Image (cartoon, rainbow, N blue to C red):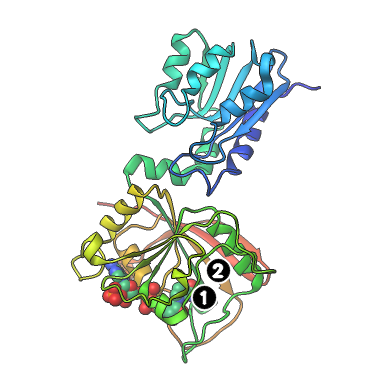
Amino acid sequence: MTSVSVDEAMRRAIELAARGLGTTSPNPVVGCVLLDIDGEVVGEGFHAYAGGPHAEIVALAQAGQRAKGGTAVVTLEPCDHTGRTGPCSTALVQAGVLRVVIAVPDPNPVASGGAATLRAAGLRVDLGVRGTEAASGNVAWLTATRRGWPYVIWKYAATLDGRSAAADGTSMWITSEAARMDVHALRSTVDAVVVGVGTVLADDPRLTVRNLRDGSLAIRQPLRVVVDSAGRTPARARVRDGAAGTWVATAAEVGAGPDGGVDLPAFLAALHGRGVRAVLLEGGPRLAGAFLAAGLVDRVVGYLAPRLLGAGPAALADAGVTTIAEAIDLETTDVTQVGPDLRITALPRKREG
Ligand SMILES: NC(=O)c1ccc[n+]([C@@H]2O[C@H](COP(=O)([O-])OP(=O)(O)OC[C@H]3O[C@@H](n4cnc5c(N)ncnc54)[C@H](OP(=O)(O)O)[C@@H]3O)[C@@H](O)[C@H]2O)c1
């Protein structure tokens, strides 16, 4: 066996953490690598689902006696409280680990304090190794935990001239099968998929995570949510087919905003209360415009097909912008070709004032 550096171990722990994306809420994704006294990997683990063992516990179980005198490399500060499982800080101390390397401190006041407990027990604790990388892998949970409402990704599909449908309303399919499969992969990483009632009435989508090749359903499904102020979602709509959980969020239940639609901040707070940390907002243009106008979008993912329509509805309706100086500026963070289409990921820049 060869020994690995703490930095390499953290890179591996970040990879392991990503395996939990979409299944751990309301908990974070966490990965852990245990090195023995000689720096050899003796245990690996990740948090797979809320209520299941934490990453450190999985790695400690693998390592057994070989954890003694070793180093735990973990993407998030070990928890210090007893929830559905016991405190990881105590488990690390009891296993005889001498050093704990942490990428990101835990912002959750209920669970934080692990680093202090470890130090008080005499362990060496290093904080911040590959912190930016680990935080970006956990961005939805970290953001949602700090501010108390979910991280919102707005996803849309459009032609190169920004149309989401043709003039006669037909829109299936603007993008390629490869792009649609990519959307299913994106859905599988979130806790809820949200559309406005306009999309349900126009397209009757299922909003489930499916394998496009054989149509089979993924094991875990995000909550399907329709923002529908007056409860116009038909009883026979596909989102109500029982294939996954469904919530029709009405103004009567959530509260009404100034324009009579569902109050969006209250809606997001209600989703947070249901354990949702990451949301995929799939439109349509009106609801997306309202989210953007309210500054409630954290990430934009656009699938652009190399096609032109010249007429037809735009991918985004009124977002509160009337003049170019008010344009919602984005910072592009990724451009990837998916089949014939382009997937552009961008983050809204924080506005001044
Ligand atoms: N290309 C794409 O990526 C994509 C994605 C999705 C949809 N689409 C297309 O979009 C079209 C539907 O567009 P749409 O804009 O009517 O659909 P939408 O955005 O899905 O739904 C809009 C409706 O949501 C309800 N709503 C409730 N609260 C709201 C709030 N606070 N802000 C805004 N809306 C609120 C309103 O109806 P109530 O007043 O009755 O509540 C509103 O009319 C379809 O043709 C579909 O094909 C395209």
Of all residues, the one furthest to the bottom in this rendering is 168
Q: Please tell me whether residue 318 is drawn above or below residue 45 in the rendered image.
A: below
* Ligand 1 location (quadrant): bottom left
Q: Quadrant of the N terminus?
A: top right
Q: Position of residue 222 (x, y in %)?
A: 49, 57
Q: Position of residue 326 (x, y in %)?
A: 31, 66
What residue appears at the point 45 percent right and 26 percent down from the top-left corner?
A: 79
Nearest the eye: 337 or 145: 145
Q: Are marks 1 and 2 in contact (CB under 8 Å)?
A: yes
| Circle 2 residue | 303
151 relative position to 216: left or right: left
CB of residue at label 1: within 8 Å of ligand 1? yes
| Circle 1 residue | 158
Amino acid at circle 1 = Ala
> Dot 2: few (<14), some (14–19), or many (≥20) neighbours within 10 Å?
many
8 relative position to 135: left or right: right
Q: Is residue 57 visible?
A: yes
Q: Quadrant of residue 237?
A: bottom left
Nearest the eye: 296 or 23: 23
Q: Quadrant of residue 59?
A: top right
Q: Earlier in the sequence, mark 1 or mark 2?
A: 1
Q: Label 1 vs label 2: CA separation?
A: 6 Å
What residue appears at the point 69 percent right and 12 percent down from the top-left corner?
A: 37
Q: Position of residue 211 (x, y in %)?
A: 64, 64
CB of residue at label 2: within 8 Å of ligand 1? yes
Numbered disc total: 2
